[in-house]
Amino acid sequence: MLSDTNKARVSVLVHALVGVGVGYASLFVGRALFAFILMIIAMLVMGRIAERTFAKGKGRSWWLANGALVLGFLWFLSWVLFLNVGV
């Protein structure tokens, strides 16, 4: 069983990987609005998964700090990076 600190670390890592993956997938949707909508959908899906897996009974503030901000930041960072590199 994982401690609370390890659960937070795993949650951040999973959200970071999903953020980079969604950033890469955003290249193929065409427009910035659709890329943003794709990120919101991924964030909501990951929020449900993280709430059931890592944050039982901790509420939305735990997920915002340990997942949503990380996913949103890394999505934007990787999307801009992949867009400029021309992957």
Image: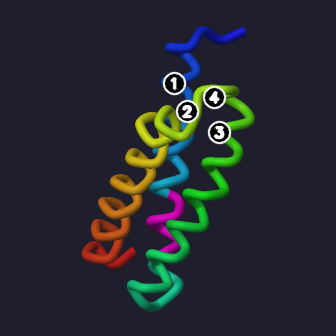
Depth order, front residue of 77/51: 51
Sequence-wise, the earlier of marks 4 and 1 is: 1
Please rate how many residues cluster around mark 2, counting C-alpha atoms within 10 Å: few if below 14, some from 14 to 19, many from 20.
many
Inter-mark Cα distance, 3 to 1: 10 Å
Which amino acid type is shown beneath numbered disc 1?
Ala
Depth order, front residue of 40/60: 60
Q: Is residue 80 left or right of residue 13?
A: left
Please rate how many residues cluster around mark 1, counting C-alpha atoms within 10 Å: few if below 14, some from 14 to 19, many from 20.
many
Which amino acid type is shown beneath numbered disc 3?
Ala
Quick check: 64 above or below 82?
Answer: above
Q: Position of residue 86 (x, y in %)?
A: 33, 78
Q: Nearer the viewer, mark 2 or mark 3?
A: 3
Q: Which residue is mark 4?
A: 55
Which amino acid type is shown beneath numbered disc 2?
Ser
Q: Over which residues does the magenta segment extend?
A: 21-26
Quick check: 82 above or below 48?
Answer: below
In the picture, the quarter occupied by the C terminus is bottom left
Please rate how many residues cluster around mark 4, counting C-alpha atoms within 10 Å: few if below 14, some from 14 to 19, many from 20.
many
Could you tell me which residue is drawn at 65 percent across and 28 percent down? 54
Q: Secondary structure at mark 4?
A: loop
Q: Which residue is mark 3?
A: 50
* Res. 8 mark: 1
Sequence-wise, the earlier of marks 2 and 4 is: 2
- Main SS class of the magenta portion in the image: helix
Q: Position of residue 50 (x, y in %)?
A: 65, 39
Q: Which residue is mark 2?
A: 11
Marks 2 & 3, CB-CB < 8 Å contact: yes
